[in-house]
Image: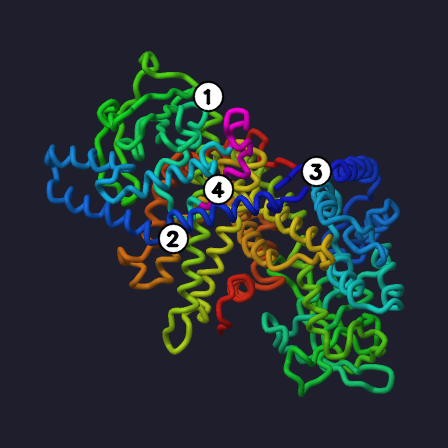
């Protein structure tokens, strides 16, 4: 037993962090936010107007388009594709990197840390199922049932994971919202357009192609989402500690006050507990381990963003601070794949089934 | 990242399992919790059995009489003994987890030869004399004084929260040997014979009703200079080695026990109908995630300690122990609060096992460094925040 990251895993983690610092630094993140914000203002002016709705759909299609300043999206997606972000777990003979879930978790943790936008999880899962997903040239989103679909307007395909098998629906040219009769929602997260979907297409529809094991893909998606939550929790901890060490009040850094120190200490504990759960689940891939990892990572991401906001004081409440972006994304991911309520029920059932104690 | 056992580790587990299956049925019945001499005898006979089977001082270095096992093997030992229902370390806790490792790390050859073998054989019991009535979290303010008189120190003062004091042969004692030095620099570490003239033990009753610890009064007790471990006035550093041990793997076996308790709680709730309450059910589910992740955190910390050991380090668990201790102590209290919810009014019966545990769990956020002290450690030593008050 050696739970630590090995040298290759450390190198992979450092490499992804460097790539994201280069391709998606904070200035890029804020450019994207500002571009989306402009559209939000436009949308607000036309509330309830059909024209306005179309505008939103149009806007979301610009995930990879140049018209909104979102050309970042396309380039970033390609960079990630070239770095093997999407093809990481495909066998080398299929053009992949041939690595496993532990390595995927490390990459998604970095993506969560950097707040990379886009349907990363679904596109990663679709590598091997949807041509172009592995390379990052096609964008794939996913649905497990009626509810919120992210980036539907920008997606070339939708993974439907509502049953035992996975189905793939083509939505080229931004046809997703129309095909699924989805209503655009003014998303709480400025970087994640959302669409409310009432009903999934019936399995009888012929343009759907089958592929993959639905249960396995849902489990993987849950864990990769948890990994992003972990990355976000670690990032908001860093932000809080940096601010607490530099911001001065009463003639000293606020981080020298125990009230602030203990907030930060609890953030670290939350993140480290989530890290243990997420990394271990990537090794065992057991249902209860994955549910527990998601539960603890959701809590770490949401609570740490809240505490980070608190440490930042008034600045934390502003649009210009990045804290709200982490909090809003954390809220969004909390609702995806396995909500805390669902995870707790699954874990409770596991206790009765005797999976509460998994030795080794 | 690898959570699977190596072939060597798996062999170790299988041999241990086989030995436990053979040894445990031959144990005498467990003594009454109030009968301290019987508890000492029971704990020591178990330690002797471990010694004879080659499992004593598993994590101690081989040159201290230990088995030189890897931290991973030590973890397997804690896990398997707990799963098999073997006795807890009990009265030998301080000897095996605090005083022994300190003597092994800092003692002279003669001191190691005198004190370590009897600990490993279960012949001598140690207690800990660190805290004082006026020196709790602020341990470095301790005032028990030791002045030189010929070949001995003359020690006067009071110690408190001393577990197993009534049945201990030795006490690892922190004393002030230089009252004028900066407070961390005037402390020394002594081995105090508990039968020395001038030592008085007064049991303290806990809120659970039992006498788990005591006050120890020292009135001009003579302790030979040769009983000092480490240099004079270097006792603070010597002590930090000990405390790191305490916060490291000391609770690993208990996490296993908590996970088993949780599974039993779920069964109990299903039986008495409380399971139908979704709030309670979800709380049980949440605790399952909590204790599983805590076990993984132990494995994470042990892996880090094993790595440090292989690279010439001490193998002493580092600050990761504070993260674990903070979260574990809270989770343990939540576990037994939840048990009370499962039991309902039956939880008011103090004879109920889970009620006794609920009471004793209240000490966990205080003993071995309060939660507030742990948060200070994390903030300043891990996060690097400026020193505060």
Q: Considering only order in the chain, which callout, 1 or 2, is on the residue closer to the N terminus?
A: 1
Q: Is residue A344 above or below residue B358?
A: above
Q: Which residue is mark 3?
A: B5
Compute the Cα span from label 2 to label 4: 21 Å
**Distance between mark 2 and mark 1 Cα atoms:** 35 Å
Please say whether residue A269 is one of the residues in the magenta stretch.
no
Q: Nearer the viewer, residue A175 or A273?
A: A175
CA gap, disc 3 and disc 4: 26 Å
Which residue position holds label 2?
A305
- Helix, strand or loop at mark 4: helix
Are labels 2 and 1 assigned to the same chain? yes
Label 1 chain ID? A
Disc 2 and disc 3 on one polypeptide chain: no
Q: Which residue is mark 1?
A: A212
Label 4 environment density (alpha carbons within 10 Å; few <14, some 14–19, many ≥20):
many
Q: Are marks 1 and 3 in contact (CB under 8 Å)?
A: no
Magenta segment boundaries in residue numbering: A89-110
């Amino acid at each position: 037993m050696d739970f630590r990251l090995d040298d290759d895993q450390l190198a992979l983690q450092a490499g992804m962090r460097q790539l994201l610092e280069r391709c998606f630094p904070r200035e890029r993140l804020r450019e994207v936010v500002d571009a989306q914000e402009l559209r939000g203002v436009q949308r607000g002016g036309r509330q309830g107007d059909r024209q306005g709705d179309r505008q939103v759909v149009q806007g979301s299609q610009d995930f990879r388009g140049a018209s909104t300043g979102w050309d970042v999206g396309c380039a970033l997606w390609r960079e990630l594709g070239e770095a093997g972000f999407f093809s990481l777990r495909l066998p080398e003979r299929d053009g992949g990197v041939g690595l496993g879930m532990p390595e995927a978790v490390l990459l998604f943790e970095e993506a969560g840390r950097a707040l990379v936008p886009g349907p990363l999880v679904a596109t990663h899962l679709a590598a091997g199922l949807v041509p172009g997903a592995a390379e990052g040239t096609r964008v794939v989103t996913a649905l497990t049932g009626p509810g919120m679909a992210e980036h539907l307007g920008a997606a070339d395909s939708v993974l439907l994971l509502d049953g035992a098998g996975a189905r793939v629906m083509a939505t080229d040219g931004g046809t997703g919202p129309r095909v699924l009769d989805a209503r655009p929602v003014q998303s709480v997260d400025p970087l994640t357009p959302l669409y409310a979907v009432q009903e999934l297409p019936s399995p009888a529809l012929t343009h759907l192609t089958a592929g993959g094991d639905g249960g396995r893909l849902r489990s993987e998606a849950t864990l990769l989402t948890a990994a992003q939550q972990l990355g976000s929790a670690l990032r908001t901890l860093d932000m809080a500690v940096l601010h607490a060490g530099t911001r001065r009040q009463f003639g000293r850094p606020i981080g020298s006050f125990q009230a602030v120190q203990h907030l930060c200490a609890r953030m670290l504990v939350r993140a480290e507990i989530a890290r243990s759960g997420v990394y271990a689940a990537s090794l065992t891939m057991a249902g209860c381990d994955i549910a527990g990892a998601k539960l603890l990572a959701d809590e770490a991401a949401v609570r740490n963003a809240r505490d980070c906001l608190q440490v930042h004081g008034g600045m934390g409440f502003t649009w210009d601070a990045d804290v709200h972006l982490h909090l809003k994304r954390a809220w969004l991911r909390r609702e995806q794949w396995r909500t805390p309520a669902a995870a707790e029920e699954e874990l409770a059932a596991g206790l009765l089934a005797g999976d509460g104690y998994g030795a080794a | 990242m690898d959570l699977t056992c190596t072939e060597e580790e798996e062999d170790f587990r299988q041999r241990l399992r086989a030995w436990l299956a053979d040894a445990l049925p031959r144990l005498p019945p467990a003594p009454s919790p109030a009968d301290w001499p019987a508890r000492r005898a029971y704990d020591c006979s178990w330690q002797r059995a471990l010694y004879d089977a080659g499992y004593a001082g598993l994590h101690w270095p081989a040159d201290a009489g230990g088995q030189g096992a890897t931290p991973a093997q030590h973890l397997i030992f804690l896990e398997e003994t707990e799963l098999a229902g073997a006795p807890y370390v009990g009265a030998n806790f301080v000897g095996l987890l605090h005083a022994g490792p300190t003597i092994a790390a800092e003692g002279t050859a003669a001191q190691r030869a005198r004190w370590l073998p009897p600990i490993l054989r279960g012949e001598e019991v140690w207690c800990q004399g660190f805290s004082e009535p006026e020196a709790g979290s602020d341990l470095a303010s301790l005032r028990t004084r030791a002045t030189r008189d010929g070949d001995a120190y003359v020690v006067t003062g009071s110690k408190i929260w001393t577990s197993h004091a009534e049945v201990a042969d030795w006490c690892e004692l922190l004393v002030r040997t230089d009252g004028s030095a900066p407070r961390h620099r005037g402390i020394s570490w002594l081995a105090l014979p508990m039968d020395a003239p001038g030592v008085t033990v007064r049991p303290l009753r806990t809120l659970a009703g039992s006498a788990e610890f005591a006050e120890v009064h020292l009135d001009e007790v003579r302790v030979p200079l040769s009983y000092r471990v480490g240099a004079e006035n270097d006792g603070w550093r010597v002590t930090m080695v000990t405390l790191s041990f305490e916060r490291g793997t000391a609770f690993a076996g208990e996490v296993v026990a908590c996970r088993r308790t949780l599974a039993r709680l779920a069964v109990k709730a299903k039986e008495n109908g409380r399971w139908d309450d979704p709030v309670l059910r979800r709380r049980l589910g949440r605790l399952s995630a909590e204790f599983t992740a805590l076990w993984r955190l132990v494995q994470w910390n042990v892996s880090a300690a094993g790595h440090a050991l292989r690279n010439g380090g001490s193998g002493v668990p580092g600050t990761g122990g504070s993260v674990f201790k903070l979260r574990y102590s809270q989770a343990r209290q939540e576990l037994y609060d939840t048990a009370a919810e499962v039991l309902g009014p039956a939880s008011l019966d103090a004879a109920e096992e889970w009620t006794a545990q609920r009471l004793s769990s209240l000490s966990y956020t205080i003993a071995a460094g309060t939660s507030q002290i742990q948060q200070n450690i994390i903030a300043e030593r891990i996060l690097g925040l400026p020193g505060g008050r």
